[in-house]
Image: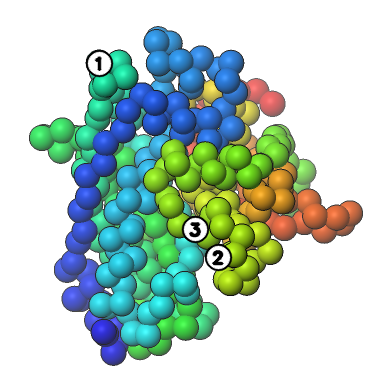
């Protein structure tokens, strides 16, 4: 058990995992993010443009973060697993996710490696930034880059950086424009969606399905997995400004601010603002009562390739 944060030692460590995915898993993932059953490029493997939604790259990330989370007690003093929450996320898609060949029996194997790149003081704890690279094949072709920033509460920050290092888009957050959103799309969550996402993503944390676990953690109901909420927001932006063309997606960065309760059928409203340079700023809110809303994803930015975004 660590007694002090040793940044040099932490940065020397790495974790690697291999994951496989099938056509069925890609389809299940798309459906778990609310894809329409009539949108053949997302649900029919024989469609000429069949593909996974842009945030499919968070699936191997979830797998390797299980290893990082299990090791946090080795390098964070006073670490307790229930004090670790997903705080911010960055995803850059380098090339489309490989589609398995060979029908129902086909599989693609991906290798994902994680390493801690920064630990910064944050409130009564620290923010741990984990760089995650996913590759395919023996040659190690890079598919996507993720950075998972986890807030760990009640951890002594002695040895951590006062603030985070500026690493460009990986650390940059955007304020919400004061003007009215250019587009707003909504999605009603459900308990069935939460259960489907757990199965499709492999994130089997009981906090996302079991009412007793959620109650013990101080929540009124199970929490929808944060990467699911993020995936819904990215789907909305691609639909609104790229005509549903996932090839236009380049990257996303956002803060996961508050929980979503699919068991209570929270309705998500993705508010979007078109900016120059292919940037779409966004946030996701849940409207709780007249004049009151819960911001569940904030300070988000999605970059689309070039500035040829769809007209408003």
Residue holding disc 2: 213
The percent position of residue 301, horizontal first and vertical second, equals 53, 46
Q: Is residue 69 above or below residue 173?
A: below
The percent position of residue 5, horizontal first and vertical second, equals 29, 83
Res 75 → quadrant? bottom left
The percent position of residue 242, horizontal first and vertical second, equals 55, 25
Q: Give the Cα separation between the discs numbered 1 and 2.
A: 40 Å
Mark toward the start of the polypeptide (3 vs 1): 1
Q: Give the Cα separation between the discs numbered 3 and 1.
A: 34 Å
Q: How is the image coloured?
A: rainbow
Whether pointer 3 and pointer 2 mark residues with C-beta atoms closer than 8 Å, the reply is yes
> Could you tell me which secondary element the residue under label 3 belongs to?
helix
Instruction: Mark 3 vs mark 1: give the one in front.
Output: 3
Kindly identify the residue that appears in the image at 22 percent across and 50 percent down: 17
| Residue 102: assigned label | 1
Quadrant of the snapshot with the C terminus: top right
Res 199 → quadrant? top left
Res 106 → quadrant? top left
Report the side of 287 relative to 89 (left or right).
right
Q: Is residue 65 above or below residue 151?
A: above
Quadrant of the snapshot with the N terminus: bottom left
Instruction: Mark 1 vs mark 2: give the one in front.
Output: 2
Residue holding disc 3: 206
Q: How many residues crowd mark 1 within 10 Å: few (<14), some (14–19), many (20+)?
A: few
Whether pointer 1 and pointer 2 mark residues with C-beta atoms closer than 8 Å, the reply is no
Q: Is residue 163 above or below residue 23?
A: below
């Amino acid at each position: 058990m660590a007694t002090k944060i040793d940044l040099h030692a932490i940065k020397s460590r790495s974790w690697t995992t291999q994951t496989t995915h099938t056509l069925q898993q890609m389809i299940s993932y798309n459906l778990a993010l609310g894809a329409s059953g009539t949108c053949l490029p997302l649900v029919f493997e024989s469609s000429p443009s069949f593909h996974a939604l842009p945030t499919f790259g968070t699936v191997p990330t979830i797998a390797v973060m299980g290893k990082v989370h299990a090791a946090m007690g080795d390098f964070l003093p006073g670490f307790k697993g229930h004090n670790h929450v997903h705080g911010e996320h960055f995803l850059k898609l380098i090339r489309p996710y490989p589609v398995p060949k060979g029908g129902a029996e086909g599989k693609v194997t991906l290798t994902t490696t994680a390493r801690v790149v920064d630990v910064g003081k944050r409130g009564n704890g620290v923010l741990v930034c984990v760089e995650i690279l996913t590759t395919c094949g023996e040659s190690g072709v890079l598919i996507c880059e993720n950075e998972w920033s986890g807030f760990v509460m009640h951890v002594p920050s002695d040895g951590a950086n006062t603030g985070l290092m500026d690493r460009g888009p990986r650390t940059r957050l955007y304020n919400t424009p004061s003007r009215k959103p250019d587009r707003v799309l909504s999605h009603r969550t459900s308990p069935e969606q939460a259960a489907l996402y757990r199965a499709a993503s492999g994130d089997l944390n009981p906090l996302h399905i079991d009412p007793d676990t959620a109650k013990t953690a101080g929540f009124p109901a199970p929490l929808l997995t944060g990467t699911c909420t993020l995936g819904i927001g990215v789907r909305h932006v691609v639909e609104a400004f790229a005509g549903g063309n996932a090839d236009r997606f380049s990257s996303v960065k956002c803060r996961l601010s508050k929980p979503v309760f699919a068991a209570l059928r929270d309705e998500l409203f993705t508010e979007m603002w078109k900016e120059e340079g292919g940037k779409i700023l966004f946030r996701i809110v849940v409207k709780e009562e007249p004049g009151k809303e819960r911001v569940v994803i904030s300070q988000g930015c999605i970059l689309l390739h070039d500035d040829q975004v769809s007209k408003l």
